[in-house]
Image: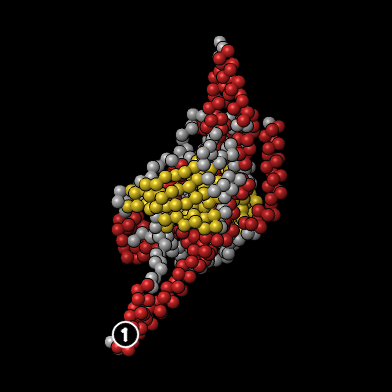
Amino acid sequence: MISANNVTLRLGKKALFEDVNIKFTEGNCYGLIGANGAGKSTFLKILSGKLETTKGDIFITPGQRMSVLEQDHFKYDEYPVMDVVIMGNERLYQIMKEKDAIYAKEDFTDEDGIRASELEGEFAELNGWEAESDAAMLLNGLGIGTDFHFSMMNTLNGNEKVKVLLAKALFGNPDILLLDEPTNHLDLDAIAWLEDFLIDFDNTVIVVSHDRYFLNKVCTHTADIDYGKIQLYAGNYDFWYESSQLLIKQMKEANKKKEEKIKELQEFISRFSANASKSKQATSRKRALEKIELEEIRPSSRKYPYVDFRPDREIGNEVLTVEGISKTIDGVKVLDNISFIVGRNDKIAFVGGNELAKTTLFQILMDEIKPDEGTFKWGVTTSQAYFPKDSTKEFDNDYTIVDWLTGYSPVKDVTYVRGFLGRMLFAGEDGVKKVNILSGGEKVRCLLSKMMISGANCLILDEPTNHLDMESITALNNGMIKFPGVELFACHDHQFVQTTANRIMEILPDGQLIDKITTYDEYLASDEMARKRTVYTNKNVEDDN
């Protein structure tokens, strides 16, 4: 168990948290939610002891081990992958290293023998003999193949490092598990594996995530941060939403009845306060009036942008034809003879773990890179807007947000441009911020403003939900559902894909394409056994090699 007792945290004059009391108990998974800036990650740092409180304290049941998902992807670059995962149980890793050092000695003494015996006993108690197999299970589940288990961390790419750090956090059955955005940079298969792992996990989990489907799947409770307080709800994200909306509705109805009573009492007092025969009754009602207190209903600190893609022209029957596209990058064939035709009503989600293949295909379709083989052709009625996975170049300048967006606007009018920025929560002075100092979420909202102002009827989006808060993801999800044009997108948010796409394409590790007209849930259900056979076959091939 872990609890916060009267916790207050002040940053300068501002109180981020004020007298927070909350208890997290064993066997439950708590989703920690709140608007950007509400303090979700900060609260996890307080719980983990990485940040001191201004007032109050954190209590952890004595003897319990806490594990935290780390965010520094370069911290362990000089260590092997397997070592990093086992470091998740710090004491076990220390024992392993001390044992190795003792057994490596040339002049092995009696004292060394006694110490080695002590370490072996503790090693066995901590399930040390199963450590490597347990770590391998976690890595394989998250999509890190056996070939990489003993590689150095600095040989892995960013997404692979994230998976290793997640495996490190999960390793060794910790009593308390703190996860800050664990699904970031995970493919949908790895997220599904993590969901199953956490559902079966018997200890305490506290997780911050912007993935609504993930929170609904794994959470038994929801802890909502708003205005420096944390309100605990039994149930997942959807249950919290329904409960919180119902609570506000009930408070409003209760206030309405109280207001009617107040009005009735005020009218009686006004009418009879000067009447001698009614003065006692008037005085009595005045006392009753003073006792009535309206419930304080504070509007949530959450802010929802308004995403509305409106194409300037209707799209024709001929949209996009892709024929035989192949592309090799750094000696690896990421696209192998890809062909498909896009219809005017298609909303296509590109799924699966081949991240580079999806990004490469989008870059080819936007004419940013050339294929090695094959062709593609956009219809004459089409116009495209593109959301790149890496937008570094877009913001490598000294423009203000208004000037930056005006450069892409067909109408060079500041009021017109600010209208689009206002929809994405850039109001007033925000418009004169320099784009090169924006946060990740602010850059995403700028790019969505650019797509809206373009009036395109074909949208290509490569991981648009990265860096967005729950409210912005919901707004983008709704905007894409309403959009009357064509969409090609890659996204790790299960609910986003399920509610938006009517066609699923998966680019396999060998660069070939699976193409089905179906929803995402139906695709997963129909291909579950085929996927397992593919994994099994690939594993056998690796083992044979």
| Classed neighbour count for the residue bearing mark 1: other residues with Cα under 10 Å, few (<14), some (14–19), many (≥20) | some
Q: Is residue 484 visible?
A: yes
Q: Is residue 336 visible?
A: no
Q: Is residue 48 above or below residue 404?
A: above
- Give percent across and percent down for residue 292: 38, 73
- Left or right: 14 with respect to 337? left
Secondary structure at numbered mark 1:
helix
- Give percent across and percent down for residue 465: 49, 53
Color theme of the render = secondary structure
Towards the viewer: 300 or 62:
62
- Give percent across and percent down for residue 378: 53, 58
- The amino acid pointed to by label 1 is Ser
User: Which residue corresponds to the image point at 41% horizontal and 66% vertical from the top-left?
Assistant: 297
Which residue has dot 1 on it?
A: 279
Specify the farthest residue to the left: 274
Specify the farthest residue to the top: 107
